[in-house]
Image (cartoon, rainbow, N blue to C red):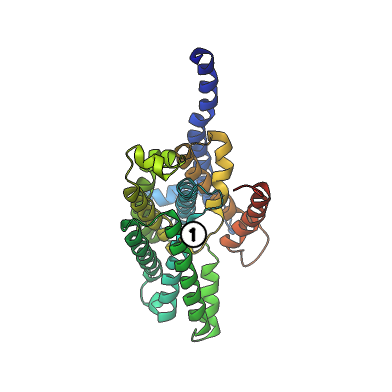
Amino acid sequence: MSAPLRPAIVERSRPGRLLVPALAILVGMLVLASIACGYAAFDVSAAFADWLAGRNTLPALVLSELRIPRALLGALVGFSLGLTGAVMQGYLRNPLADPGILGISSAAALGAVIVFYSGMAGALSLALPLGGIAGAAGAALAINLLAMRGTGTLGLILAGVGLSSLAGALTALALNFAPNPYAALEIVFWLMGSLTDRSMDHVWLCLPLMLVGWLLMLSTGRALDALSLGEDTAASLGFDLVSVRLRIVTGAALAVGSGVAVSGAIGFVGLVVPHLVRPLVGARPSASLLPSGFAGAALVLVADIAVRLLPTRPELKLGVVTALVGAPFLIGLLFHHRGRG
C-alpha cells in the first residue's frame, strides 16, 4: 500500500520545497525594485558606485540614507508580520488570528504615542522606536506572566483583547489631550504606518530584536504541528505547552513590537499572507512559517512600491494601502468560513 502512495507524496512536497527559494528570490528582486523606485529619477548603478567609493554625491546620499533603509525595513517588517501571523494562526488554530491578537501591536503604538506626547521624540532621534519597543516589552511581560501561571489559550486571547482595548483607550486619551492639533495630526499620521524617512539607525535598532523573535517562533514549528491535534495531544507527545507559549509570545513581541516601533501600524499582512501560502504547502502549520515570512516581506514591499507609484501627493500611508487590500480579504474569509465551528 505504501509504495503507490510514495510518488504522490513526493509530488505534493516538491512545490513546498521550491516555494521558499522562489519567494526569497522574489523578495530580493522587490528590494532592488524598491531601491530603484522613488520620486526623483537617478542612475541607480552610478549612485551605487559613488556610495561604494565613498563619494558623498547627492544620488549616493539618497541611496544610502533613504532608499536602502526603506527597502530593508519593508522586507524586515513584512517578514515579521507574515511569520507571526502564521504562528498565531497555527497556535490558536484560528484562521482569523493575526499578529495583533495579543495586544502587542497596540501596546507598541501606545509607547510611541507617549514619546510623541511627552516631547522626547524631538530630543532623541531614536526615542520614537525605543518608546514603541518599551510598550511592546511591557505587553509581552504581562502576557508572559499569565503564560507562566499556566493560563490557557483562551485566557491569553482575552488578555490580549484587554491589553489592546486599554492601549487603544490610552492612545485616544493622548490624542484628546494633545497640546496642539499639529501634534495630534502627527500622531495620527504615524499610527497609519509608513516607511518614509527611515534611516539605517532604524534598521540596526530593530534587526537584532527581529532575528531573536524569528528564531523563537521558528523553534515552535513541531509543537504547532502537534497542537493542531489539540493541547492534550500535544502535551501527551512531550511538548511543554508553557514553554511553547513563552516562546511564541516573546518572539511575537520582539518581531512585531520592533516592527511597529519603526514603521507604525501596518495591518492585515499577518492575516492575509498565511492564507495565500497554505494552499501551496498543505495544512501542516510548520510548513507555512518560512513561506509566510517571505510572502509577507514581498507583500509589504509591493505595497510600499505602490504608494510611491500612485499619483498622490503626499503619498498614501502604507497601513492604509494594506488595509484596503486586507479588509475585503477578511470579509471574504468570513463568508468562506460561515457556518463552521
Residue at 51% across, 45% down: 32
Residue at 50% across, 60% down: 195
| Picture coordinates of residue 34, whole percent (x, y) | 54, 50
Q: Nearer the viewer, residue 307 or 333?
A: 333
Residue at 43% across, 67% down: 107
| Picture coordinates of residue 172, whole percent (x, y) | 52, 77
- Is there any visible trace of residue 117 in the rendered image? yes
| Picture coordinates of residue 93, whole percent (x, y) | 50, 47
Q: Residue 154 appears in which quarter of the rendering? A: bottom left
Residue 217, above or below 24: below
- Is there any visible trace of residue 57 in the rendered image? no
Q: Residue 147 appears in which quarter of the rendering? A: bottom left
Label 1 belongs to which residue? 100
Q: Would residue 340 appear left or right of 254 to someone viewing this image?
A: right
Residue at 50% across, 17% down: 6
Residue 285, above or below 303: above
Residue 216, above or below 110: above
Q: Residues within 10 Å of mark 1 (few under 14, many from 20)?
A: many
* Numbered disc total: 1
Q: Nearer the viewer, residue 220 or 318?
A: 220
Q: Nearer the viewer, residue 218 or 211?
A: 218
| Picture coordinates of residue 121, whole percent (x, y) | 40, 75
Q: Amino acid at mark 1?
A: Gly
Local SS, label 1: helix
Q: Residue 234 appears in which quarter of the rendering? A: top left
